[in-house]
Image: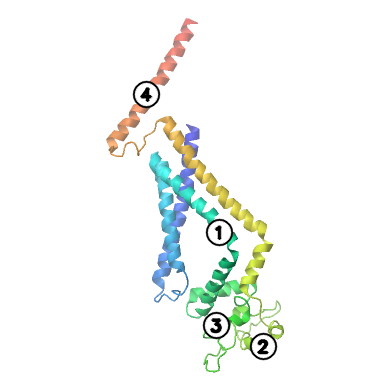
């Protein structure tokens, strides 16, 4: 019984944790969708808010099946939970293989997506903060180099551009010295007109795509460890409901797939019969032991 309860509550806690995480993802996605008066990220492949809602909804459904099956000893939801997890696991492996085989196309699509984000800079506060964070974190500027910012209408180098930031780059591209007490927010102005060797004294000139790839290659152990940990977690989550289903069937617990029309009273009566049968077997065994003791 201890093993049965251990598997049951381990599965429930695991599913409940990710159920709460999925609810948070949905809430954040809905808030982000409502907070924006205009969808200025419609040029991107997928709206980030909509992506959060979709991922959260799928996680919510999957983890609900696991929680319900664990609490109600229902093999049907548990089997559905097991099948969906197996499909997700196989899709992740397939995506990794496809990404490895078609690396050039993946990089091309990634570059186009990042360039679209640069074009929408200054039009969406969240997107602007995300780009600034990446450029500061990886000490980069643009996608391939700092002159990619000419694709943005605010930083375009056209003579007819009335923007004060024309031919410049964002403040997040600027190099900040450790002993610098006052930051010059106009340090990126006119940097696109300078050659790379001169511009590199004031701003980062290497593109963010190259810097991100460089970081990934130099942190292969970390990336590989996180990926392996995620896969092991999914494998463990696949084996837990399978073991729990076997325990339920072995112990003769109620199977909602076999009794879909059973009412509450039928289920309670069925469980009572099982408990009475187990109790009578225990009493019979105890009586037999006492009888043998008296004869001895």
To which residue does mark 2 refer?
194
> Which mark is first along the chain, 4 or 2?
2
Of tags 3 and 1, the one toward the viewer is: 1
Q: Nearer the viewer, mark 2 or mark 4?
A: 2
Q: Which residue is mark 3?
A: 151
Instruction: State how the image is colored.
Output: rainbow
- Residue behind mark 4: 277
Q: Secondary structure at mark 3?
A: helix
Q: Residues within 10 Å of mark 1 (few under 14, many from 20)?
A: few
Q: Are marks 1 and 4 in contact (CB under 8 Å)?
A: no
Mark 4 burial class by Cα count in 10 Å: few <14, some 14-19, many 20+:
few
State which tag comes first along the sequence, 1 or 4.
1
| Vertical side of 202 occupied by 84: above or below | above
Instruction: For the residues labelled 2 and 1, say whether their Cβ atoms are less than 8 Å apart.
Output: no
Q: Residue at x 72, y 83 (%)?
A: 197
Give the Cα separation between the discs numbered 1 and 4: 55 Å
- The x, y position of residue 204, in whole percent, is 66, 78
Q: Report the residue marked by disc 1.
A: 98
Badge 4 element: helix
- Rendered residue at 49%/33% (across/down): 2
Residue count near mark 2 (Cα–Cα under 10 Å), binned few <14, some 14–19, many ≥20: few
The CA distance from mark 3 to mark 1 is 31 Å
How far is disc 2 from disc 4 in space, using C-alphas? 88 Å
State the image quarter where residue 168 is shown. Answer: bottom right
Q: Quadrant of residue 96?
A: bottom right
Left or right of 27 in this view: 127: right
Number of the front mark, 1 or 4: 1
Q: Earlier in the sequence, mark 3 or mark 2?
A: 3
């Amino acid at each position: 019984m201890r093993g049965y309860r251990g598997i049951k509550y381990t599965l429930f806690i695991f599913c409940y944790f990710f159920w709460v995480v999925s609810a948070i993802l949905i809430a954040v996605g809905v808030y982000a969708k409502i907070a924006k008066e205009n969808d200025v990220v419609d040029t991107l492949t997928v709206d980030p808010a909509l992506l959060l809602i979709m991922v959260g909804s799928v996680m919510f459904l999957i983890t609900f099946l696991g929680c319900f099956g664990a609490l109600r000893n229902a093999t049907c939801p548990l089997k559905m939970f097991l099948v969906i997890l197996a499909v997700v696991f196989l899709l992740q492996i397939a995506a990794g293989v496809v990404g490895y085989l078609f690396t050039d196309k993946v990089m091309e699509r990634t570059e186009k997506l990042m360039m679209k984000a640069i074009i929408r800079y200054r039009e969406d506060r969240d997107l602007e903060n995300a780009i600034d964070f990446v450029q500061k974190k990886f000490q980069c500027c643009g996608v391939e180099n700092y002159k990619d910012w000419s694709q943005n209408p605010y930083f375009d180098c056209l003579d007819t551009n009335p923007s004060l930031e024309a031919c410049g780059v964002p403040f997040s591209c600027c190099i900040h010295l450790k002993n610098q007490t006052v930051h010059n927010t106009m340090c990126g102005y006119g940097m696109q007109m300078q050659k790379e060797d001169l511009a590199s004294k004031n701003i980062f000139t290497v593109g963010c795509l190259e810097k991100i790839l460089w970081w990934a290659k130099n942190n292969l152990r970390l990336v590989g460890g996180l990926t392996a940990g995620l896969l092991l977690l999914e494998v463990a989550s696949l084996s837990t409901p399978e073991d729990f289903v076997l325990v339920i069937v072995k112990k003769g617990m109620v199977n909602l797939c076999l009794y879909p029309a059973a009412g509450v009273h039928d289920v309670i009566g069925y469980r009572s019969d099982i408990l009475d049968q187990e109790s009578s077997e225990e009493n019979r065994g105890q009586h037999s032991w006492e009888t043998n003791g008296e004869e001895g």
